[in-house]
Amino acid sequence: MTLARAYLRAMWDAKLVLAFTLLLSLTMFILAPLLMIGLRSVGKGWFGRLWLPPQLTLDWYRWAIEVGNIPEVMKNTLIIGGIAVAVSTAIGIFAGWAFGRRQLPGKEVLMAIVLLPRMIPPITYGLGVAKIFYTLQLVDTYLGVAMAHVSVCAPYAILVLSATFEGLDERVLEAAGVCGANTIKRFFYVVLPLIMPGILASMIFSFTNSYNEFTLTLLTYGPHTVTLPVRTYLAVGDGYWEITSAMAMLMVVPSLVILALIQRRAKPEKLVGGFKGV
Amino acid sequence: MTDAMIEFRDVSKRYGSLLANDHLSLTIRRGELMTLLGPSGCGKTTALRCLTGYVRPDEGRVFIDGTDITDLPTHQRELGMVFQNFALFPHMTVHDNVGFPLMIRNLGKAEKDERVTQALRLVRLEGYGDHYPRQLSGGQQQRVGLARALVYRPKVLLLDEPLSNLDAKLREEMRFEIKEVVTRLGITAVYVTHDQGEALALSDRVAIMNRGRLEQVGTPEEIYEHPQSRFVAEFIGLSNFLEGHVQSTDRDTMVVSIGGVQVGAPALPNAGPGQRVLLFLRPNEVELLRPDVPGGTNVFEARVEKATYLGDTIDYRLTFGQGLALRVQTDAQRRFGQGTEVRIRLPRIRCWAITSG
């Protein structure tokens, strides 16, 4: 009896060990490159076959910020991101209203068209965008790069806000009308507060998309509109691995901040669904 | 008519091939609680939405207090409405929900607070002002809905199946609560429901609708005791239907011949001998007698085919005459077993007849 129990116990322990091993492997698989770059960005005199850098330093960060002109690049990135967020959320609100609340003929087809920029390989799409932007002289302008980003941000905004508007309870809007609110008051006092979670989600999605967008930026940027991903990529060409690593680590920071904000402020899954079922 | 508060004048609304309202004409008096009753799809909700303005009638006009409101936008109609799914504003506290109509009307804060407090007291929800709707039970949420509808003293209160999302016990309680509040305020109210029990318990008058048309309008007593059509009799409670023809008439009574028996019933105006009629008899109005009771008018021999025990009553399926079926419900005091020969008495004044065919 005790033997059987001990045997079972051992099996149980083995299962735990196995589970943890797998989990750890998965974590390592995902985190190893990041860890690698992270170590590289603070290591000094790290040559040969050493497992860990012999000396730690923050010099590379200073270099990255000064040589890579990071403040300027960060400014570009944020301005372009800001424009992209504003435009795609505005598009998302109107399109989302239409998709979520109206009986549109051919709704599925329209939605497919909206999602098309995400389905076409970015390089294919970006080449076309670049061609048009050169003609319109939109290349190397904040607006131009931001508009290119909108093509990938807007589909997310539309998707999220369509779902939000669909979740709006028609009866609640009717109730506001019966209570005496006209269309404008209904929108500001009832609709807007109720879709706020959706708008926030759409803004976060749009911003992270714009912030991380590489291919489209590469095809539309110029000396005045270098963004963080492009700057990092250019630094790779310069051959300074340490500085590039520092830049790459710097890029991660805003993403982490946003993640922390989402985690603390709201449940992401709740943001998407709006107030369905309340 | 000076006492008309709401008037539907020849209102029609068509959805594709479905005629939701078919030349509906109905007058609701000032201070009256009128129930629109009918099965789903009968057009009662469409009629209500013609009042709120969320449905524009294809034909006809709608009047409130003498004003033609057919083309008036919803927010100018000065209505109060209680919704089936409560339709409270989930992002506002109870206080703000109830105060919403006042806020829209730019009332001063002091007066607004005063009236919100009053309205919450009216529905016995004092002290819940800071709660959010999701923190309340269904019954409480619906009371908030009622307070919100009444807070700005609208001319008309509309109630769209307000109790059907509540559980049975609460429904019964809320019934009386709504009735009491509406009576106390003396407000004109339109109540839409498919529950005949609710309609009978609450209403001053009931309008029964079927396929977009009015079947009958009357007080709960009139509707229950003197239905004007088979549909109404079937919809309001259980009823036996006996088809026959008039054999003879004698001032205020007539004799109807049904499947080999002669039943005395109150006379119908302009129904001479030979006229086909339909007799209604509620199952609880038939008297069940022992077989040795002497016969008389409207007393017939019958046979118990099936007896079902229902707790407070027993439900009998009887046959009498030439294969006539009759459903009878009596209290559970005296019981007759299956296959027993009995006598039944059909009280003459309870035999309600309408002409048919």
Image (cartoon, coloured by chain):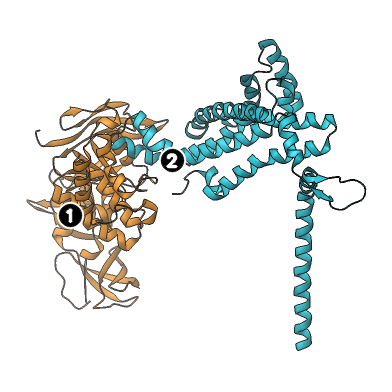
Chain colours: A cyan, B orange
Observer-nearest of B218 and B150: B150
Q: Is residue B323 visible?
A: no
Q: Is residue A64 visible?
A: yes
Tell which subunit mark 2 falls on.
Answer: A
Residue A152 image label? none
User: What amino acid type is highlighted by mark number 2?
Assistant: Leu
Residue found 24% across the figure and 78% down from its top: B334
Q: Compared to A169, does B283 lie above or below?
A: below
Find residue B142 and report its horizontal and vertical position in percent: 31, 52
Q: Compared to A11, does A104 lie above or below?
A: above
Residue A194 image label? 2
The residue where tag 1 is placed is B180
Quadrant position of the N terminus of chain B in the picture: top left
Q: Are marks 2 and 1 on the same chain?
A: no
Find residue A78 and report its horizontal and vertical position in percent: 61, 30
Label 2 Cα crowd, 10 Å radius (few <14 / some 14-19 / many 20+): many
User: What amino acid type is highlighted by mark number 1?
Assistant: Glu
